[in-house]
């Protein structure tokens, strides 16, 4: 009888040991879901930190135009005033040379400066809070290794009442959710890695989201919004009518993220800068993980049904005819008689989502300022479009944009000279 009990105890002991092992493995899988890819883990600690800094595009905000890298001074103009980015080089007087790893973690995770002051959410700690402690430590270690730059930057120029810093306590209570990214156990490790990069270090929500009057995101669906400090519109990533990837292949999304061009689209404007400074350096594993996550985003429910458009009134036809003349003179040689473009060189304008978006700001600004895809390792000599704001008047810009938005099967609203004027800086 004793032998039977011992045998039974042994069976249960083995069962619990196996259960413990499985729980341990499940936890490990949970952690690895957001941890570094195989390519990244092969790098040294400093190289990993540099990689993460590039993924987060820290250089983009913490470097003034023509200034020293990471020395700050970049001016971010918003409806609340102008924010000036700080020096994050290891200079002990003007940078973060006296900061500890804990100080840096509090800034990333809690949105607090070294002295405990609450940071303005122009620094996207609302996204960075999802970054793991390990990644934050690697980023800090890299920033401490770069050359120190002594540079005193001017203070923020924030309008009343937004310059009353105690109001940040109320703002944070209402809109800030602190916490490291928690993997979705129903999803793959690859999907979770992509979600971690998009939602956290990549801080895509900083641009691709609508904001309320207090500057807080209205939702977490990346449904598009005006880019803070820029007269550009960041298109929705959940609408196939804008920049959603639901009907794209993973390879097409990876190509666009990594090189700035793909068979179906081309990055321009602020997003081209992000690709040049940041996304082109993604490892193949991370680019694929981000593509998998972006493709999986649920489609927004604001998809408009097919519309039977009535015949155009004569005055609209005449307006578009003027735009067609301008198109033939300045645009047709590159974009084609039917708006078909040239694959990999000049983007097609027919059935081009960026051309027919409800908000026409981006296409207007492209005509005014030119269209330049990023120079990347995979696209080292990109073709670009020159600016036309010195060649044609605002009224003519409106006419040609209106024509492009309504030719070759495109259907978009008409654009006026007033719209063009408002789309300038």
Image: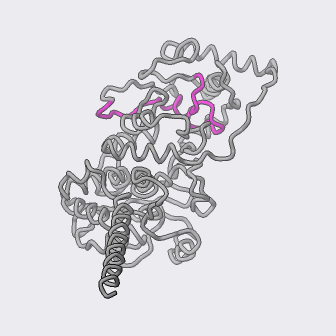
Name the side, left or right, on which 107 lies relative to 150: right
Residue 353 in magenta stretch: yes
Residue under the image location 42 percent in, 34 percent down: 251
Q: Position of residue 252 (x, y in %)?
A: 44, 33
Name the side, left or right, on which 7 lies relative to 274: left
- Bounds of the magenta segment: 350-378
Question: Nearest the camera: 134 or 175?
Answer: 134
Q: Is residue 225 visible?
A: no
Question: Nearest the camera: 245 or 14?
Answer: 14
Q: Position of residue 254 (x, y in %)?
A: 40, 38
Residue lying furthest front in this view?
Answer: 1
Asked if residue 63 is positioned above or below residue 378 in the image, the reply reads below
Residue 330 in magenta stretch: no
Q: Is residue 387 visible?
A: yes
Q: Position of residue 322 (x, y in %)?
A: 67, 17
Name the side, left or right, on which 399 lies relative to 98: right
Question: Nearest the camera: 314 or 128?
Answer: 128
Q: Position of residue 391 (x, y in %)?
A: 52, 22
Residue under the image location 44 percent in, 74 percent down: 118
């Amino acid at each position: 009888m004793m032998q039977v009990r011992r045998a039974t105890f042994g069976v249960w002991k083995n069962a619990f040991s196996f259960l413990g092992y499985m729980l341990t493995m499940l936890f490990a899988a949970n952690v690895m879901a957001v941890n570094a890819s195989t390519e990244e883990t092969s790098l040294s600690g400093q190289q990993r930190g540099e990689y993460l800094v590039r993924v987060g595009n820290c250089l983009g905000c913490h470097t003034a135009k023509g200034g020293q890298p990471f020395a700050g001074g970049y001016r971010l103009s918003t409806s609340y005033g102008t924010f000036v980015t700080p020096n994050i080089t290891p200079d002990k007087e003007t940078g973060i040379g006296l900061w500890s790893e804990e100080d840096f973690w509090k800034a990333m995770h809690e949105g607090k400066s070294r002295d405990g002051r609450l940071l303005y959410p122009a620094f996207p700690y609302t996204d960075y809070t999802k970054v793991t402690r390990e990644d934050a430590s690697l980023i800090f270690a890299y920033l401490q290794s770069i050359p120190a730059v002594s540079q005193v930057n001017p203070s923020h120029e924030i309008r009343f009442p937004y310059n009353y810093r105690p109001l940040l306590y109320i703002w944070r209570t209402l809109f800030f959710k602190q916490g490291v990214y928690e993997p979705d156990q129903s999803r793959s490790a690859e999907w979770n890695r992509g979600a971690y990069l998009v939602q956290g270090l990549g801080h895509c929500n900083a641009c691709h989201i609508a904001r309320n009057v207090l500057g807080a995101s209205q939702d977490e669906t990346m449904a598009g919004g005006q880019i803070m400090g820029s007269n550009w519109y960041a298109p929705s990533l959940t609408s196939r009518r804008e920049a959603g990837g639901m009907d794209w292949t993973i390879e097409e999304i990876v190509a666009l993220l990594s090189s700035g061009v793909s068979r179906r689209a081309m990055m321009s404007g602020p997003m081209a800068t992000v690709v040049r400074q940041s996304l082109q350096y993604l490892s193949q594993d991370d680019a694929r993980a981000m593509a998998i996550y972006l493709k999986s985003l649920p489609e927004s429910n604001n998809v408009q049904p097919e519309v039977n458009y009535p015949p155009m009134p004569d005055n609209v036809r005449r307006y578009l005819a003027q735009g067609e003349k301008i198109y033939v003179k300045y645009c047709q040689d590159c974009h084609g008689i039917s708006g078909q473009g040239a694959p990999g060189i000049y983007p097609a304008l027919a059935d081009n989502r960026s051309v027919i978006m409800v908000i026409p700001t981006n296409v207007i600004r492209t005509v005014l300022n030119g269209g330049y895809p990023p120079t990347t390792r995979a696209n080292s000599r990109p073709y670009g479009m020159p600016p036309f704001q010195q060649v044609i008047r605002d009224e003519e810009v409106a006419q040609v944009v209106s024509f492009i938005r309504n030719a070759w099967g495109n259907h978009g609203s008409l654009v006026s000279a007033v719209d063009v004027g408002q789309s300038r800086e």
